[in-house]
Structures are given as C-alpha cells and as structure tokens.
Image (cartoon, grey):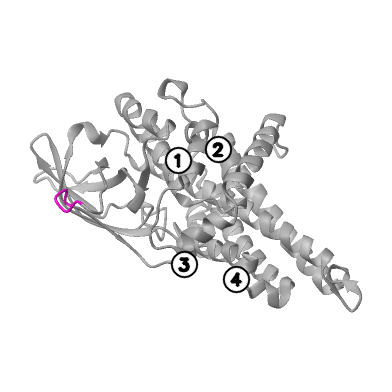
Amino acid sequence: MKLVASKQERDLAAMLRNVLATECPPELPRSFKETKDRRVPGQLWKTLTNIGVLGLPFDERYGGSSGSLDDLGVFFVEAGRVLCPTVVHSALYFGLAIDRLGDDAQRQRYLGRLCAGKLHGAIALWNPRDASDLRPTLTAEPAPGGWRVSGTLDFVADADLADVLVVTAGTAELAEPRRTLGLCIDTIDTTDTTTGVRVEPLQAMAGSSLCRVVLEGVHVAESQVLPATGTGELRRLANTVVVLQCLDMVGGADAVLRRTVGHTTSRHQFGRPIGSFQAAQHLVANMHIALTSARLASRSALFWLGRGRMATRETAIARMHAATAYKRITLDAHQLHGGMGYVRETDLHLWSERARTFATIDGTAEVAAGWLRGEVGLG
C-alpha cells in the first residue's frame, strides 16, 4: 500500500478543509447536540452538493464525480476533524449500498437524486453492535407485486432525516430455504402513520441521531429489491463503512491533538509553557503515536478495500487502533487542558462525546478483536 498521499489527495484535503472550516464551525455540531428539532444543515448540504462530495465515489453516469474510495476517505478525515453532522455520512453510506448492491435501474433512480442533493438516505444492514453480524432482524413475506416487511430496527443512524432506508430482511416463504433480501424502504415519514413505518428517536450523547424504526406490514415493490445481497457483498460493504468511520475518528483525533499542542505551548504555569514539562511531553508523544497507528491502519484497510479485497483482517486492526486512539486522545486532552478542558465553552467535549459514540456503534475495539481472532483462526 502507499504510505504517502498523492498530490491530488493533498489538494482535495486542502480544499475540503477550507470549505468545512467555513460551513461546519463548532456552532453547527453544538446546535445538533442542544436542539431537539433536528434538521438537515441546509447550507452545508448545498455546499457539499455543489463541490461534488455527495457524488464523490459514484460514476458520472449517475451524476457522480467518478472518484475513488481513497478520495472518499480523504473527505471522511476532514469531516471528522470538524465533527461534520452524521446525516452526511449516512447519505454516503446509503449511496455506497445502492452502488454495491443495486442494479443499474436502481442506481439511476437513487444515485442521481443523491448526487444532486435531492435525497437523504440511511442504512440498517447489520447488527449495530457488531458489523460482522449480518443476520436480518426484519421478516419479509410474499405479497402481490413484492413483499410485506415487518419488524424492528434499533440504533439506526439518521433514520429520522432519511427519505429512503436500505435494510435487509429474511424471507418467510413456506417450503423454501430462508434467504436475505436487500430492500429500499421509501418515504420514511415520522408524521404519516398510514405508511406502516414508525421512527422513534432514541436518547444518545453528542446529539447522535440514533433511532428505532418499526415496520408493520410495509409493502415493498419488487423493483425495490436489491439483487446483490449475498454475505460476501454485505460484509465488504460493512467493512467499508467501518473503515470510513475509522478515518472520521482519525480526523477527529488529529483535530484534538492539534488543539492540545496549541494549548500546551501557549498556556504557562510557574513561568513556563506547560508543554515544556516532561509529563506533558510524554502524554502528547503517546497521543501522537496512537494517532499515527490509527491513521496507518485505517489507510491500509481502505487501500485494500478499494482494490476489491474483503480486508476483514485490516478492517479489524483499523477499528481496534482508531476506536482506542480517539477515546485515549480525548481523555488525555482533557487532562492537559486542566480545569478549562471540562468547561463546555471550550467545545472539547464535542470531540470526546463523538469519540465515545463512534467507538461503540458497529462494534467496539473488543468486538473488532473478535473479527481478527476469526480471521487468524483463533475465534
């Protein structure tokens, strides 16, 4: 794998950093945390649409930019740096699901609207506590012209803002082997009780948009069934999403480290910068080592996923490093900031709460260690 970013990736990162610094200041994630009336951030969404981020990894035939998975990884690092609202992440995960699991007609139908900023999507394709667990919790029964789907999905990110939700359901056909269907559930509307879809926001830290989605006999047309939902396709998609989350954590951890270095060099105690004390230097050095390990592991996993490999082993290593590093770095940052590190006005808590949330959803570092044990034959 390549260890040095190309000039194109560096230019893309610089452009995204400038745009996100303007369109996603700390006030934006803070507002998501403090308000109960969640909305899609209109100006940010419009800007990301205009510069092609929402279509970055998708083919030009569908309105995309024909970028690579590496390019998408660059965006996630910069998004994590500024705590970009997760509705953007969910939309991109939705696009990847349609692109990987759907047919050409479904790509034309959904990706074009996504790339144009006219559609918000989300996914619920695996156990939110363990991304390697692909067993569906929904049940699909045959119905005229399609399927009737029922069941409950917990901890679905951004379902309350989604127009379309991609899910899996197990069939319940008599005298036939049980199989998994990938389905597009249209019109997720929290105010319309006649659709059979009920979305219930859950209480979570950091303004997280986790929801419970209850489906009661929802009719799904045959044209909304995704054809490529075998275990291999789903696991590779799950690994891709996990690694992109890892890169978001890398970006967030890097932002916290930079803030901390700036604080320790400007804050004085006993007539000296606190960064000149050996204890502080050791903490900062350990933060840097943890961040570098997470960055290299995450980039390695994305590199191999972008070249067609399943990369479960690399994904597990990336998850273990990124989840551990982000939490450790934010905790050490609070310590080095002293009392002011626990004052809400400094905004440091926004990153530490994001670290806790992202290090849990789809599997903790301990869960990822189980993936690795399975890959090396010890599970």
Residue drawn 73% across and 57% down?
Answer: 258
Q: Which residue is mark 2?
A: 72
Viewed as shown, does residue 260 lie left or right of 141? right
Q: Which mark is residue 205?
A: 3
* Of marks 1 and 4, the one in the foreground: 4
* Of marks 3 and 1, the one in the foreground: 3
Residue drawn 42% across and 53% down?
Answer: 131
| Viewer-closest of 130 and 221 | 221
Q: Is residue 193 visible?
A: yes
> Residue reaching furthest top?
61
Answer above or below: position of 298 versus 225: below
The answer to whether mark 1 and mark 2 are in CB contact below 8 A is: yes
Q: Main secondary structure of the magenta part?
A: loop
Q: Is residue 360 visible?
A: no
* Of marks 2 and 4, the one in the foreground: 4
Q: Which residue is mark 1?
A: 92
Q: Position of residue 59 (x, y in %)?
A: 46, 24
Distance between the alpha carbons at the discs numbered 3 and 4: 14 Å
Q: Position of residue 159 (x, y in %)?
A: 34, 52
Task: Identify which amino acid the numbered label 4 is placed on.
Answer: Arg
Q: Position of residue 371 (x, y in %)?
A: 48, 55
User: Tag 4, which secondary structure?
Assistant: helix
Q: Which residue is mark 4?
A: 344
Task: Identify which amino acid the numbered label 2 is placed on.
Answer: Leu
Magenta highlight range: 192-196
* Of marks 3 and 2, the one in the foreground: 3
